């Protein structure tokens, strides 16, 4: 089968190769799918650079949709031929950017949700939902004013929708690409850059209650802190180095363990199928054109989720 993977750590465009590999065999409680679409994420390039080191070669591709091809022992929730989506394990010799991939966690792909849209959901939804819960934004917390900084990212766009569903008033920072769409969702939107904190505080009528930073690392965290009462009211999913120095909470910090058995992926998959939730997809690429997709992602100007397509 075709797979996109690396045999040494380094810059993604230098170390990744599309090559042949053995089709993986599902273990207990695992399934194997014939991949139809695979979402790309900045975490993929971090893995290439040595994040979570392990045995090589390693595959990339952390979220997929496809057709169940084989099932391991003790699997009872799906059968061959079912359409599913979910996060792909990344510790093996291959991962989601392959003709076939293993899944430990999966959700049925509901009617009305296409394979590309399904492959764009898992990382954005799980990351945004977890970050908001750690921050204190969850079902039943109506009345909070929440800033989502970087709402034009896939995680930020998902976070805006989730926070609104929980009853929060949402102020979002975003560029022109998604500003109007975010306003249509119900968010109040302002731009990035100099004076952002003052604009946010003016919209809010004072400091916001909580702020979620989902923007790429850009030295903007001090400005985000100026939108709240204290640094601990901010959580970042990206700028971990600055967060430690500034007293900002981390997505996976020591206090980030929250009990949550909600089937988030399935819930938002169904909402997406119903047309009431989305993660913006900027472009799709045949797997043979992976270098173009990776280059666009690394440019910092993806403009939404980039998805690889498999036959």
Image (cartoon, helix red, strand yellow):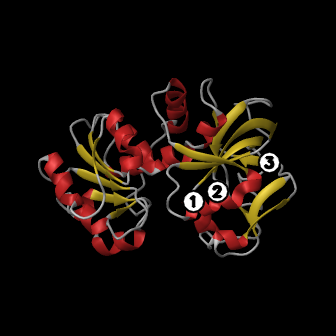
Residue 53 occupies quadrant: bottom right
Q: Out of 72 and 221, give the one closest to the viewer.
A: 221
Q: Is residue 19 above or below residue 102?
A: below
Where residue 263 sits: x, y (%)?
52, 36
Q: CA distance from mark 3 to mark 2?
A: 17 Å
When asked about the image quadrant of residue 77, the answer is: top right
- The residue depicted at 40 percent of the width and 44 percent of the height is 178
Look at discs 1 and 3 and give the one toward the viewer.
1
- Is 226 positioned to the left or the right of 140 in the image? left
**x%, y% of residue 128?**
43, 48
- As helix, strand or loop, the secondary structure at mark 1 comes to helix
**Mark 3 highlights which residue?**
99
Decide: is 63 above or below 299: above
Nearest to the observer: residue 120 or residue 83: 120
As drawn, the label of residue 73 is none
Kindly identify which numbered label has been placed on residue 297.
1
* Residue 40 occupies quadrant: bottom right
């Amino acid at each position: 089968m075709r797979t996109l993977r690396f045999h040494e750590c380094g810059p993604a465009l230098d170390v990744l190769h599309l090559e042949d590999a053995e089709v993986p065999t599902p273990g207990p409680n695992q399934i194997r799918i014939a991949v139809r679409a695979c979402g790309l994420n900045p975490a993929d390039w971090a893995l290439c650079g040595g994040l979570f080191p392990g045995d090589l070669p390693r595959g990339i591709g952390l979220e997929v949709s496809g057709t169940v091809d084989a099932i391991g022992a003790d699997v009872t929730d799906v059968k061959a031929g079912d359409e599913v989506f979910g996060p792909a394990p990344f510790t093996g010799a291959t991962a989601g950017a392959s003709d076939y991939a293993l899944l430990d966690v999966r959700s049925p792909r509901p009617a009305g949700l296409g394979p590309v849209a399904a492959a764009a959901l898992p990382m954005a939804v799980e990351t945004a939902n977890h970050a908001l819960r750690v921050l204190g934004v969850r079902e039943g917390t109506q009345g909070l004013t929440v800033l989502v900084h970087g709402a034009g990212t896939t995680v930020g766009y998902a976070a805006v929708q989730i926070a609104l569903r929980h009853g929060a008033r949402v102020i979002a920072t975003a560029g022109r690409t998604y500003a109007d769409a975010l306003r249509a969702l119900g968010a109040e939107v302002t731009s990035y850059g100099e004076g952002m904190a003052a604009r946010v505080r003016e919209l809010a009528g004072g400091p916001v209650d909580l702020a979620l930073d989902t923007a790429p690392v850009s030295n903007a965290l001090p400005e985000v802190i100026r939108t709240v009462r204290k640094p601990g009211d901010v959580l970042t999913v990206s700028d971990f180095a600055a967060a430690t120095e500034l007293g900002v909470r981390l997505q996976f910090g020591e206090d980030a363990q929250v009990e949550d058995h909600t089937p988030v992926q399935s819930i938002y998959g169904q909402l997406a199928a119903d047309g009431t939730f989305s993660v913006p997809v900027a472009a799709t690429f045949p797997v043979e054109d992976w270098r173009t997709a990776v280059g666009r992602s690394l440019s910092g100007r993806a403009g939404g989720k980039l998805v690889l397509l498999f036959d």
